């Protein structure tokens, strides 16, 4: 695959932090096989149901980040294509809730954010590929209350990690 040198993030003032510090990228099986399987020995892979959550073990760049560009840009995972929108996925019983949010530190967020409707459509495709088209899937924008709960859960998890070390 060709490395894409020119992408909308070229003017990033934080050196494409989303790509150069891979952490918590959610993937379907198909996306994992296409973009990350060949790098499985370089990355930490966790499973959340049918999803793959990949991070670099040492906080380094995405293994597809090569020569200042993305080697899989044309077929990149949906969560990468959505950025600076990101996904929050919860499964409760047989219902899948996918929330789209743009709570990121991307300095180009205002210029890069596409429409919420387009982001929700891509999120639905992601969920249907991961959980199956027959699954009960709800997709929507994250509410303020959901943002608060997500941040609180993250804070509590970090505190437990610190206390358990």
Image (cartoon, rainbow, N blue to C red):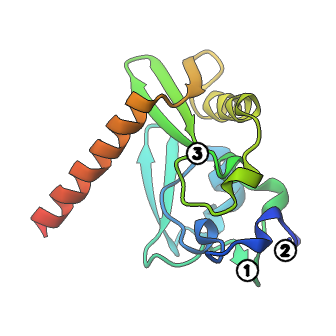
- Find out whether the residues at labels 2 and 1 contact each other: C-beta distance under 8 Å: yes
Residue at 76 percent across and 35 percent down: it is: 115
Side of 144 relative to 116 (left or right): left
Q: What label does residue 139 carry, if any? A: none
According to the picture, the residue beneath numbered tag 1 turns out to be 66
Front residue of 39/79: it is 79
Question: Alpha carbon of mark 2 to alpha carbon of mark 1: how far?
Answer: 7 Å
- First of labels 2, 3 by sequence position: 2
The x, y position of residue 91, in whole percent, is 42, 27
What is the x, y in percent for residue 110? 70, 51
Residue bearing the label numbered 2: 3
Gap between marks 1 and 3 measured at Cα:
26 Å
Query: Does residue 163 appear to the left or right of 135 in the view shown?
Result: left
Location of mark 3 (residue): 102
Q: Is residue 143 visible?
A: yes
> In the drawing, does residue 9 fall left or right of residue 56?
right
Q: Nearer the viewer, mark 2 or mark 3?
A: 3
Q: Can you give x and y, in whole percent of width and height, for residue 156 in the image?
A: 21, 49
Closer-to-camera residue (41/152) = 152
Name the quarter where the C terminus is drawn: bottom left
Question: Is mark 1 in CB contact (under 8 Å) with mark 3?
Answer: no
Residue at 66% in and 28% down: 124
Task: Please determine whether, in this image, residue 85 is positioned above or below residue 147.
Answer: below
């Amino acid at each position: 695959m060709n490395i894409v040198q020119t992408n909308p993030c070229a003017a990033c003032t934080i050196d494409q932090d989303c790509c150069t510090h891979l952490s918590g990228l959610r993937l379907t099986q198909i996306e994992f096989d296409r973009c990350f399987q060949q790098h499985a020995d370089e990355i930490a892979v966790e499973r959340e149901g049918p999803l793959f959550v990949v991070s670099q073990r040492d906080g380094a760049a995405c293994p597809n980040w090569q020569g200042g560009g993305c080697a899989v840009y044309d077929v990149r995972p949906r969560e990468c294509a959505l950025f600076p929108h990101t996904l929050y996925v919860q499964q409760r019983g047989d219902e899948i809730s996918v929330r789209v949010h743009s709570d990121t530190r991307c300095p180009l967020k205002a210029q890069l954010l596409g429409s919420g409707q387009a982001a929700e459509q891509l999120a639905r495709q992601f969920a249907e590929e991961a959980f199956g088209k027959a699954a009960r899937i709800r997709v929507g924008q994250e509410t303020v209350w959901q943002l608060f709960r997500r941040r609180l859960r993250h804070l509590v998890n970090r505190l437990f990690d610190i206390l358990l070390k």
